[in-house]
Amino acid sequence: MGYQILVADDEAEIRDLLRLYLEKEGYEVLDAQDGEEALKVLREQPEIAMLILDIMMPGKDGFHVLKELRKDSNLPVIILSAKTADTDKILGLDLGADDYIAKPFNPLEAVARINSNIRRFYSLGANDSQTVKKVLQVQDLTLDLEGCILRKGEEIIDLSSTEYRLMELFMSNPGKIYTKQQIYEYGWQEPYFIADNNIMVCISKLRAKLSDDSGRYIRTVRGLGYRFETGNQTL
């Protein structure tokens, strides 16, 4: 695979365990033992493809690292933490994390989730080059599937990888109504449970980034789910 992954955790045993499993998968692994070091490595190594981030670290904790990162980067982030309360998970996802794995964890499951997020973020549609579109365009929005970049006119809209997957889902079939289950399973890449708040937070953040106060792009269909407008509907 060859992708470079940064593991930020203050426990050396966790860093060593993930390095062992990830290097067997062909990844190149870098590590950091606290938040400050993680941000330093991210600045110095722009080729890093994913961040595995602990929350409870000395100095800057994982939430602070995530806030700093999301100011100018949509790098895929998986939180790996012993903080397992729903409020912590929701906060992490709200701040822009793409997945949340609770400690103690099964390293094989962690690797599977890492593989899934890498594949979705960097190789979306790569297995069907004859039929897949390279660019999706709806209204004044353009989604570059190869570069994973969303543009509104000439403006680049920064997205987390979960937000990117939702935009890819919506823009692939504008006008189609998606249920919350369909949205969650595509965006978060795991079986649906009662996760309405996660979906609402993500949709709200997308609308804010698109300046979509009037529902010009993402329309709530009461009792059914959400629909991405083609621009031809009567609002």
Image (spheres, rainbow, N blue to C red):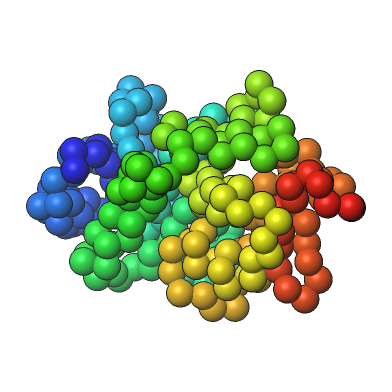
Determine the residue positioned at 52% across, 75% down.
Answer: 192
Position in image of residue 34 (x %, y %): 35, 42
Which quadrant is home to the N terminus? Answer: top left
Residue furthest to the front in view is 130
Position in image of residue 42 (x %, y %): 36, 30
Residue furthest to the right in view is 235
Determine the residue positioned at 21% across, 66% down.
Answer: 108
* Above or below for 34 versus 73: below
Which image quarter: residue 222?
bottom right
Determine the residue positioned at 56% across, 69% down.
Answer: 182
Q: How many marks?
A: 0
Position in image of residue 40 (x %, y %): 37, 28
* Above or below for 144 versus 105: above
* Above or below for 34 versus 149: below
Taking 30 as reference, is 139 left or right?
A: right
Taking 1 as reference, is 168 left or right?
A: right
Taking 77 as reference, is 108 left or right?
A: left
Q: Is residue 77 visible?
A: yes
Q: Is residue 36 visible?
A: no
Q: Nearer the viewer, residue 231 or 30?
A: 231
Q: Nearer the viewer, residue 129 or 208?
A: 129
Q: Nearer the viewer, residue 199 or 221?
A: 221
Which image quarter: residue 70?
top right
Determine the residue positioned at 58% across, 64% down.
Answer: 183
Position in image of residue 107 (x %, y %): 22, 65
